[in-house]
Image (spheres, rainbow, N blue to C red):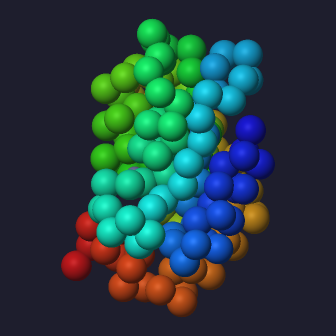
Amino acid sequence: MLAVAVHEARIGLAEGGIPIGAALFDADGRLLGSGHNRRVQHGDPSAHGETDAFRNAGRQRSYRDTIMVTTLAPCWYCSGLVRQFNIGTVIVGETRNFAGGLDWLRSVGVNVVDIDDPECVKLLAEYIRDNPAVWNEDIGEG
Ligand SMILES: [Zn+2]
């Protein structure tokens, strides 16, 4: 499942965007939708990897048994999306570049799995090194 999110991150990078990808799966591991951060490509600060995957998955009757997989720990905004729709499980590729709202998600009962994948760490670390201003804008830092 993480490979789908990483593939999306690489598409985003190839488009000139921030390499963060995500995918939403059902309980059986069937892909419902995937997406990637499009802040730069669309000039849309709300187009995060998780929101893009969520939108591409379309309407679901319930999110309790769905699994959100993302290359990076979800920010507060995307953590809010997970909480709002009661997405039951979040699998993150890494938390080294950004810890996001994982502790909060755990505290409200979301099943959180941190894979700590070296490829995810490297992909984003290199982008942040080369594009610090875009990255700080993305996470709402001055
Ligand atoms: Zn986000």
The residue lying at 32 percent from left, 62 percent from top is 44
Residue 105: tell me if it is visible. Answer: no
- x, y percentage for residue 109? 44, 21
Q: Vertically, is 141 above or below 5?
A: below
The answer to which quarter of the image holds residue 1 is top right
Instruction: Check the picture and name the quadrant holding the C terminus.
Output: bottom left
The answer to which quarter of the image holds residue 127 is bottom right
118 left or right of 84 in image: right
**Residue in front for this viewpoint, 25 or 106:** 25
Instruction: State the residue at coordinates (53%, 31%).
Output: 57
Which residue appears farthest toward the top when viewing the image?
61
Task: Work out whether residue 142 can be spotted.
Answer: yes
Q: Position of residue 101 (x, y in %)?
A: 39, 46
Name the residue rendered at 38%, 55% in the picture: 47
Residue 139, given in percent of the width and then of the height, sits at: 34, 65
Q: In the rendered picture of this protein, how many numbered marks are placed on residues?
A: 0
The image shows residue 70, relative to residue 104, as above or below, that is below
* 24 vs 78, nearest the viewer: 24
The spot of residue 33 in percent (x, y) is 59, 35
Query: Quick check: 76 left or right of 55?
Result: left
Vertical position of residue 53 compared to residue 129: above or below: above
Determine whether 7 is above or below 84 in the image: below
Most extreme residue toward the bottom, as rendered?
130
